Image (tube, rainbow, N blue to C red):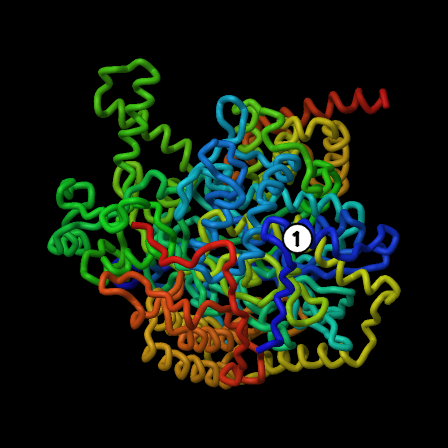
Amino acid sequence: MSVLDSKIPEGPIKDKWTNHKNNIKLVNPANKRLIDVIVVGTGLAGGSAAATLAELGYNVKAFCYQDSPRRAHSIAAQGGINAAKNYQGDGDSTYRLFYDTVKGGDYRSREANVYRLAEVSTNIIDQCVAQGVPFARDYGGLLDNRSFGGVQVSRTFYAKGQTGQQLLLGCYSAMSRQIGKGKIKMYNRHEMMDIVKVDGKARGIIARNLITGEIERHSAHAVVIASGGYGNVFFLSTNAMGSNVSAGWKIHKKGAFFANPCYTQIHPTCIPQHGDQQSKLTLMSESLRNDGRIWVPKKKEDAEAVRAGKLRGVDIPEEDRDYYLERRYPSFGNLVPRDVASRAAKERCDAGYGVGTNESGEAVYLDFSAAIMRYGQEQANIHGEHDASEARVRELGEDVVEKKYGNLFQMYEKITADNPYKVPMKIYPAVHYTMGGVWVDYNLMTTIKGCYCIGEANFSDHGANRLGASALMQGLADGYFVLPYTIGDYLANDIRTGSISTDSPEFEEAEKSVKDQINFFINNAGTKSVDHFHKRLGKVMWNKVGMARNEQGLKEAIEEIKQIREEFWKEVKVPGVADGMNLELEKAGRVADFLELGELFARDALLRNESCGGHFREEYSTEEGEAMRDDENFTHVSAWEFKGEPSDAVLHVESLVYDNIELKTRSYK
Amino acid sequence: MSGANGLNLTLKVWRQKNDKDKGQMETYQVADISPDSSFLEMMDILNEQLIEEGKEPVAFDHDCREGICGMCSMYINGEAHGPGRGITTCQLHMREFNNGDTIYIEPWRAKAFPVIKDLVVDRSGFDRIMAAGGFVSVNTSGNTQDANAIPIPKADADKAFDAATCIGCGACVASCKNASAMLFVSAKVSQFALLPQGRPEAAERVQNMVKQMDEEGFGNCSNTGACEVECPKGISLENIARMNREYLSSSFKKEEV
């Protein structure tokens, strides 16, 4: 168990990062020009890392499977980005952001990493404004903030419901500047197929040109994986269609430990599934919970009537509505953390109070009528319309709500054909984010020397549950402000290495195994499409490894996933050719990896005999249905070492030590 | 979903093996499509069907499927992103069509966007325009000035945001009879021109981006406004006016330098 050295610097928590930066090695500017770094993925983490490393003088090669780095899925993040600026003067501080994040993560994250994240959060906002990111501002011209789940201050910076887009375009513009200078060589429509290790160190990757199908060798002195999360193991999720685990899984198979795979975030406010032909789920930003109230009918017969299409939500009188989050969690109300809100929705729907008129039947209401009237009244007062009619107040209120959430309301209406200004939205939880990921030390290095992992792809900062508006913060913190420093400490030893040859046996062998797999897929005489297997895997994951898990279900899931995997390798059918664009071939490789990850995921969930954050085991809950942690036995990170089959993976444990925060039962009551 | 509401459709789809192939329209039938499905889900169903028949599925670009990544790019019944305003193809739903309809599906057509395969085109010209000047030259340092040091009038910040919402999908180019990229380029020029952070290099930026735009082979703007109509994000023509103003004034400045 001693293989895991998290390399947390000594000293008081508030000085660790500063001292560490002062003590690690630097690479002088002339030597940086002699060093190549590969970055896989161009979302907020990869994009910011690539840009910053290039600014520092390293030669960067960046890879993305999309046709442009600007399309990485960070772009879809809606709500905002946290930073402890305390511009609102509501008592925010680095410590409070640190505390909220550790508590929100249900005391399963590494203190030192989280503190550093909170510390650099303010730099991110400064940096982005300097780049020309158009954050929302108030009438005085200063930056505006809003509030997100699980916290009691307003520290979220935003750009309407498109914050991820604006931040990613900021990153992309920083990258573009370096691409123009030739400091970043950009490989669009390229997928990393494997990592190449030479003498135990990461020295390059094998990539496939997705247009020509050509298999390419790329060498570097270090490899940075920033390939995002693995939520698509569930088939249906809010992730982009192409989001995948493959980069992370390939390095796992070459020696990088994979940590806490079972920590998955099920986001409470998504548009419910409409049917079997559905390809993905759409998130409605958590920011909506600032103003929307969540409810289901109090009476079962009302819920049944709604599901049968005989009754509309708007016609249910106030006294027959159950605002169950406000009822169960009076102090946080509709702004409880995501895991809590999701489970509460499932609980009500399982009990028969769901209002989904779609095929799945599962949905709860997210209602803006109270907010519309409240804002409308405020506007009427401002405009001196003291005896405004109800209709006028509603009109004024709808205008305010439109300004705040217009694009989200429009998106909802496009998908469902319902007007959310007039009738309450219907929402249901969906897979959204994965807190688990590749294990990294304090320097963000994996257990492969010279291979780093940043952003959602790593496991480090969010524990068992991520708070809203913290993913963007972590991605940019890792890429702009952490990795560019810590990677220097490693690369300082490489200034005399010279460029890495791709003619070595290691590259040869890696390339051959990639080609073998591609040839297998193309030549396999199967009968079923890749999606067929992916959908089956997704169903098992959702039903048995989803929002609520139990021992029996997990054991069944492990067996079922194994079976699907065996069948996949016999029966999968991939049409088309290897030496050209082939979208089915791309999917096949990704689903092959999901089929392995899925099993490890279920095993990890089976071994963690407690409920914490996004991991909820039915056996470990109170009578009221609240999660029960087991701090005595599980205050640790579970890091898995690959040994062949997922069932052979060996568990390593990193104990989590809390010196600055007292472990408490998380309560939002 | 299936049964009474399901749509039976005839699809005429552009098929082209690669950039060298001539390409042609092919006809396919799909049956019992749920009106709640998105257009791309309908394409998924077509592809499943083709795979089952032992044929090669239709290649098309798509990723986020929520209207923000800008990857999807189909020309449907003669309109970029199909019927409906303010949406991308992934946000188009089958309820917009009627049972028995014939739907024509083509790639973006523009000299500067060569077809890679079927409905997939090469939009890397946009990336090269961005690399020519679509940025503010500021390094990552951690000690740039405080984000609130320069107040920005809300109206300017909002206008900059509106311009910045461009998703780079290329619908403007595909819709323009001249295949002009002016709406795309002007959105980025405007965003930075409206913000104090973007002013110091405004002149150089507009010159360099326009130069690259011309080199890529995009056409000129003749103020028809089709781009604005088809833009999924409602990017306004005002941006083109602003870019022209910036370009003109920067031309004078250039002589001073």
Q: Is A622 left or right of B241, judged from the image as shown?
A: left
Q: Residue at x 39, y 47 (%)?
A: A149
Q: Is B68 left or right of A318, judged from the image as shown?
A: right
Report the quarter where the C terminus of chain B lies: top right
Q: Nearer the viewer, residue A23 or A431?
A: A23
Q: Amino acid at mark 1?
A: Val
Report the quarter where the N terminus of chain B lies: bottom left
Q: Quadrant of residue A618?
A: bottom left
Q: Is residue A274 above or below residue B184?
A: below
Q: Which residue is mark 1?
A: A482
Q: Is A201 left or right of B164, judged from the image as shown?
A: right
Q: Percent x, y for residue A434?
A: 48, 62
Q: Nearer the viewer, residue B24 or A580?
A: A580
Badge count: 1
Q: Percent x, y for residue A44?
A: 60, 51
Q: Is residue A65 visible?
A: no
Q: Is residue A187 above or below residue B231?
A: below
User: Around disc 1, counting alpha carbons within 10 Å, would you say few (fewer than 14), some (14 to 19), or many (20 or more)?
Assistant: many
Q: Secondary structure at mark 1?
A: helix
Q: Is residue A644 above or below residue B239?
A: below
- What is the chain identity of the residue bearing mark 1? A
Q: Residue at x 71, y 81 (%)?
A: A512
Q: Quadrant of residue A258?
A: bottom right
Q: Residue at x 44, y 34 (%)?
A: A90
Q: Residue at x 64, y 61 (%)?
A: A444
Q: Percent x, y for residue A615?
A: 39, 66
